[in-house]
Image (cartoon, coloured by chain):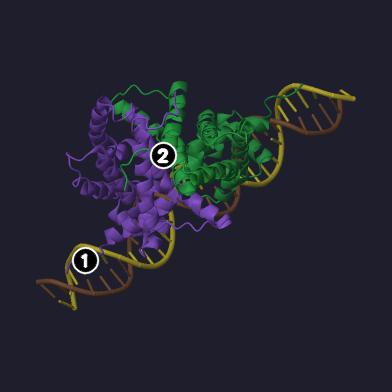
Chain colours: A purple, B green, C yellow, D brown
Amino acid sequence: MVKTETPESRILAGARQEFIEHGLGGARMQAIADRCGVNKALLHYYFRSKERLYQAVLQEIVQTMRNAIDEQLVTMNPGDDIRTLLHRFIAVYIRTLRSNPDFPRFMLREMADGGTNLSELIESVAPMLKNIPIEINRRLSAGMESGRIKRISPLHLMLNILGMCIFTFIARPIVIEINKQMPLGIEFDAAFFDMRIETILDMAMHGIAADPLSDKG
Amino acid sequence: MVKTETPESRILAGARQEFIEHGLGGARMQAIADRCGVNKALLHYYFRSKERLYQAVLQEIVQTMRNAIDEQLVTMNPGDDIRTLLHRFIAVYIRTLRSNPDFPRFMLREMADGGTNLSELIESVAPMLKNIPIEINRRLSAGMESGRIKRISPLHLMLNILGMCIFTFIARPIVIEINKQMPLGIEFDAAFFDMRIETILDMAMHGIAADPLSDKG
DNA sequence: ATACGGTTTTACCAAATAGTTTAACTGCCT
DNA sequence: AGGCAGTTAAACTATTTGGTAAAACCGTAT
């Protein structure tokens, strides 16, 4: 008799949607209640206040992301070369965000609001922002010394890679809108995201390789 | 006797700040009035409602961006090669956003809110999203046929370049926060943004050059 | 049946807030 | 002085909304 759908979980689900769509300030408790077909009083019964409910939702999302990423990271082997590392890194990002398409929107709003929970969010993304870059940086340093990899600021490299990954999802509504105005036949399907991974990896690898072209002074 | 500071302009300035910091829903008319040392009634005297005031602010921001970009674009010459075009494109983006650091924040919130005004925003950014890419695409096609440039989807290329440019500003609060937790001596100064332009251009150019490395099947 | 936890219903409170109104004030022009 | 546009002050309305209170409802286990 395992209840797969407790009132709490239903409320959390409804609240998550509402918060994602309208943010903390814009969300309405009544709307949340309506979403999950539950009485407004029950929201306060389970979660003391709107603020606490929001925190619960935040925690849930962060936890989901953390798990998804950790799950993928265990496949990362210290013996892998830089290309494999970057590939894994990029794939983790794209795939995890793809299966949690709400996360970027949620995070963007948090950031736009000045994000009181920003540091918490950052900490939750620490595995991505710290551990992996450190591992990658080690390969980079080695590569630089051996001359196979060009001197590049790790920060800039990370900004570039993360930007290419995350912007994919940020631009989604824009691309869809443009697609409406002048159809380009763009679909956000599995193939698209796989192509994204390959393209980003390719650009990153060529970007860090020691100058194969001599179009720079 | 030119009034450089009309009541309207003062109100718009105050409103812009308030809307940027708290969004349409979060902004308070009283707070706007306080910001510019003006009576609340005057807000309604000049701008009928909160919604209209917001629209006015939106228009102002969009116009500012459009002007800044147009201004830079006139320097773009059809005879320029792909590298020059990309450099100009990237520089316009970085520099324009840098001198209007509020814009990304404002736009992100608009997008997070589902952006009723999104299509308008997109149209305003059309010169960047359409005209230039078209010009660049022409060079790309020519380069691809001649074999100097590798086959790459223009959409993916644009997502990559725009991502690297825009994420610079999106990540700003994150980088600052991380810098607090473990100081890396990162400054968002002119040198940093110039370096950003060079790095992005470099990565983009190497990314599109016909395979100089053979690390791909 | 009955006692109980979870749930609903309904009504209500208190605070915040957009917007209105009206009278008074202020500087400027004639 | 008198008038006028711009501006302020302050009280007020109407509405929304988070949160509370209390009574009733309902299924279930004892």
Residue occupied by mark 2: B207
Tell me residue A209's x, y (percent): 33, 33
At label 2, counting other C-alpha atoms closer than 10 Å, the crowd grade (few under 14, some 14-19, many 20 or more) is many
Looking at the picture, tell me which residue is in the foreground, A188 or B44.
A188
Mark 2 — on which chain does it sit?
B
Q: Quadrant of the N terminus of chain A?
A: bottom left
Above or below B70: residue A183: below
Which structural element holds mark 1?
loop
Tell me residue B100's x, y (percent): 54, 31
Same chain, marks 2 and 1? Answer: no
Residue B114 shows in this picture:
no
Residue occupied by mark 1: A3
Residue positioned 34% across, 35% down in the render: A158
Residue B122 shows in this picture:
yes
* Image depth: mark 2 or mark 1 in front: 2
Above or below D25: residue A7: above
Looking at the picture, tell me which residue is in the foreground, B68 or A217.
A217
